Amino acid sequence: MDAKFYCDTIGIELIGWKAKLCDVIRNASESTVSKKQKVDPMVRELNTLIDDLDRQIDKLARECPSEWSADKTQIESKLSRMKSKWKDVWGAMGEEGEYGIGGA
């Protein structure tokens, strides 16, 4: 796969996941007090993941590496972690079957 194509494609995917994470955080902040307390540690972790996403999106846009296999492994690991945490938050808010708009 061409490095530029990879950077563009994964950048778009990361932007999509950032939007999903922001959505679940917004929904959590609008929840009842008991639900907020239950998901607060997960939401803090999602905010950290969003910071990581921002750095990775910026890096891909700014300096698309010609050798990206190490980055690809790291990104795939982060995506897997994000998907899991995202589902955990929706599940803790009692929305397991829906996962909000867009699904997983």
Image: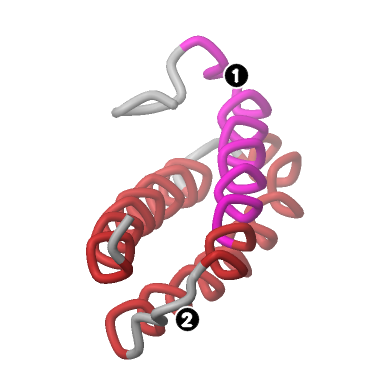
Give the side of residue 87 with respect to residue 61, left or right.
right
Identity of the residue drawn at 38% across and 45% down = 20
Q: Quadrant of the N terminus?
A: bottom left
User: Vertical placement of 90 versus 68: above or below?
Assistant: above
Rendered image: mark on residue 94:
1
Magenta: predominant secondary structure element? Answer: helix
Where's the C terminus, which quadrant?
A: top left
View extreme (bottom): residue = 62
Kindly identify the residue that appears in the image at 30 percent across and 28 percent down. 102
| Residue 34 drawn at (x, y percent) | 70, 36
Residue 41 quadrant: bottom right
Residue at figure coordinates x 55%, y 49% from the top left: 79
Q: Is residue 8 above or below residue 31?
A: below
Badge 1, how many Cα within 10 Å: few under 14, some, many 20+? Answer: few
Instruction: Name the residue beneath numbered marker 2.
Output: 55
**Residue 64, percent from left and from top:** 34, 81
Q: Given the image, on which type of amino acid does mark 1 rest?
A: Gly
> Alpha carbon of mark 1 to alpha carbon of mark 2: how far?
31 Å
Q: Residue at x 61, y 55 (%)?
A: 78
Position of 54 with respect to 34 (left or right) is: left
Start-end of magenta stretch: 75-97
26 and 53: which is toward the camera: 53
Element type where label 2 sits in the image = helix
Percent x, y for residue 103? 38, 24
Q: Which mark is residue 63?
A: none
- As for residue 78 lying within the magenta part, the answer is yes
N-term mark: 1 or 2: 2
**In the displayed structure image, the side of residue 69 where residue 100 appears, left or right:** left
Q: Is residue 23 left or right of residue 94?
A: left
The amino acid pointed to by label 2 is: Arg
Q: Is residue 39 above or below residue 88?
A: below
Residue at disc 1, secondary structure? loop
